[in-house]
Amino acid sequence: MVNSGGDSNSGIISANKVVTKDYPENIEHGFMVCGINYGYSVADEKRERAGSVGQIEQPSFFSDLSVRKTDKFRNRIIKWLKNWGFDLVTEAGKEGPLERRFFQCNWLDTQARSTEHDEITLDTLVKESDGFLGLLSQRRPSVVFLGGSILMNAVNDKRLLPRIVNILGEASEERIYLGDLPDYRGRRFRVRVRNFRNAVIIGLPHPTGSRGLSDAYMASIKLPIYAVHRMIL
């Protein structure tokens, strides 16, 4: 077990942008959904070279499907949550307290076109973690969903874990959860969960970069009861 050395977060002064609407329910103790980076398209790169890259579009809230309907990252996480018993409202203006608790951000406050090559490494995530840690410290989320195994690797890294413990409290050891489908012969993706005193961090497969990942397989994964309780209490 890792123990917290206190509540001081001196040295963490920066915070990454939140790309969803602020609500009282997500300003503090909400549900963070964190990706790796914003992700350039080929067209974005061309605009950058031309000096005309604009601001990233801000969705009205995490579960609003009227914004970014083709956002595979968000849409797939919504589907996984639904399969785990959290049926989020997806019509703008109909959101309730549960939907308003979600906010979306990225670990890296920059853009790159791919996460499949050497541009983004574990060392990069650890060295450029101040923005993420600043947001973690400011909002104190009770649940953190990380999109991509490399992000959970960064959380567990000995260079970074003590700083996270300083924010979220003492941590248990990580636990691994696999799907249970009869006669399943496909690749077995993992959901990685680490429980802290004041939050639970859930490491998901990358929603847009995991080939062969089926919704049925993800639905068969049973989250630990303490993680479910964080979302319903």
Image (cartoon, rainbow, N blue to C red):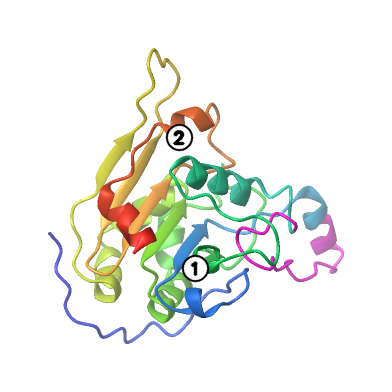
- From the viewer's perspective, tell me whether residue 69 is left or right of residue 51: left
Which image quarter is the C terminus in? bottom left
Q: Residue at x 59, y 41 (%)?
A: 208
Look at mark 1 in the image and give the residue it sits on: 101
Contact? badges 1 and 2 (CB < 8 Å): no
- From the viewer's perspective, tell me whether residue 196 is left or right of residue 228: left
Label 2 secondary element: helix
Query: Is residue 191 positioned above or below 26 on the image?
Result: above
- Characterize the magenta stretch by its predominant secondary structure: loop
Query: Is residue 23 positioned above or below 87 on the image?
Result: below
Q: Is residue 118 magenta?
A: no
Query: Is residue 50 positioned above or below 114 on the image?
Result: below
Label 1 secondary element: loop
**Magenta stretch, residue numbers:** 46-66
Look at mark 2 in the image and give the residue it sits on: 218
Residue 145 image point, x, y percent: 44, 56
Three-letter amino acid code of the residue under disc 1: Arg
Residue 98 image point, x, y percent: 49, 63
